[in-house]
Image (cartoon, rainbow, N blue to C red):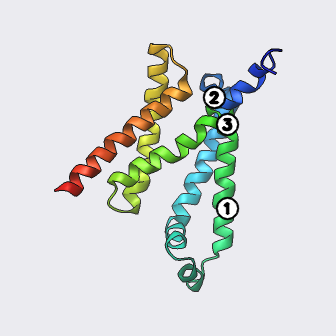
Amino acid sequence: MAQTGNFNQYSSYLVGDILSITDSEILYVFIIAIVVLVFWYFAFNKLHLISINTTLAKSKGIKTKKIDNIFAILIAIVVMVSIRWIGILLINSLLILPAASSRNIAKNMRWYHLYAVLFSLFSGIAGVIASYYFNIPTGPMIVIISGAIYFITLAIKGRVKGK
């Protein structure tokens, strides 16, 4: 496939091309972001309880299957929309690294979520800017910055625990 030149057709799905976003796709992402934020606002405590103890959540009257399914569907939609820009190979890093970085330094669940969002925003914006100035592909640059943030927070965690 690579010899015939057809690989380029699929390489954008592997490594993505964040600079190819159209105006309509930005609108879709904005709508999805609003839906996710509304869900997160109303279901935060329920999701937290489900993640800690599903049986307790069920005893409190929380429809755990319904909330789990909505959460999984929202993640699937976010991944589906962003695969073309970020790429299949990089999307896992972008899902995991900000959360792992946040876990290193967060004191509670609310700070955990806030740090994860801030780390994601920072690495995304800094990655786009750095890729422009250093002429490096954008997706990998974002992941490199996310990885650097992870190691910085890991070092901070080590110092705090060491004292």
Q: Are the residues flagged by discs 3 and 2 in contact, CB closer than 8 Å?
A: no
Across and down, in percent, residue 116 comes to: 44, 48
Q: Is residue 8 above or below residue 27?
A: above
Q: Quadrant of residue 138?
A: top right
Across and down, in percent, residue 133 comes to: 44, 14
Count of numbered tags: 3
| Secondary element at image label 3 | helix
Which is nearer the N-term, disc 2 or disc 1?
Answer: 2
Q: Can residue 115 be seen in this snapshot?
A: no
Question: Residue type at mark 1?
Answer: Ile
Q: Which residue is mark 1?
A: 70
Across and down, in percent, residue 66 comes to: 68, 70
Q: Is residue 48 above or below residue 5?
A: below
Which is nearer the N-term, disc 3 or disc 1?
Answer: 1
Q: Is residue 155 above or below residue 50?
A: above
Front of the two marks 3 and 1: 3
Q: Quadrant of residue 72?
A: bottom right
Front of the two marks 2 and 1: 2
Q: Which residue is mark 3?
A: 83
Q: CA distance from mark 3 to mark 1?
A: 20 Å
Q: Which mark is residue 15?
A: 2
Residue located farthest toward the left when viewing the structure as drawn: 163
Across and down, in percent, residue 160 comes to: 22, 54
| Secondary element at image label 2 | helix
Q: Residues within 10 Å of mark 3 (few under 14, many from 20)?
A: many
For the N terminus, which image quadrant? Answer: top right
Q: Residue at x 54, y 67 (%)?
A: 47
Q: Residue at x 70, y 42 (%)?
A: 80
Q: Is residue 1 above or below residue 158?
A: above
Question: Residue type at mark 3?
Answer: Ile
| Residue 33 or residue 10, whichever sits in front | 10
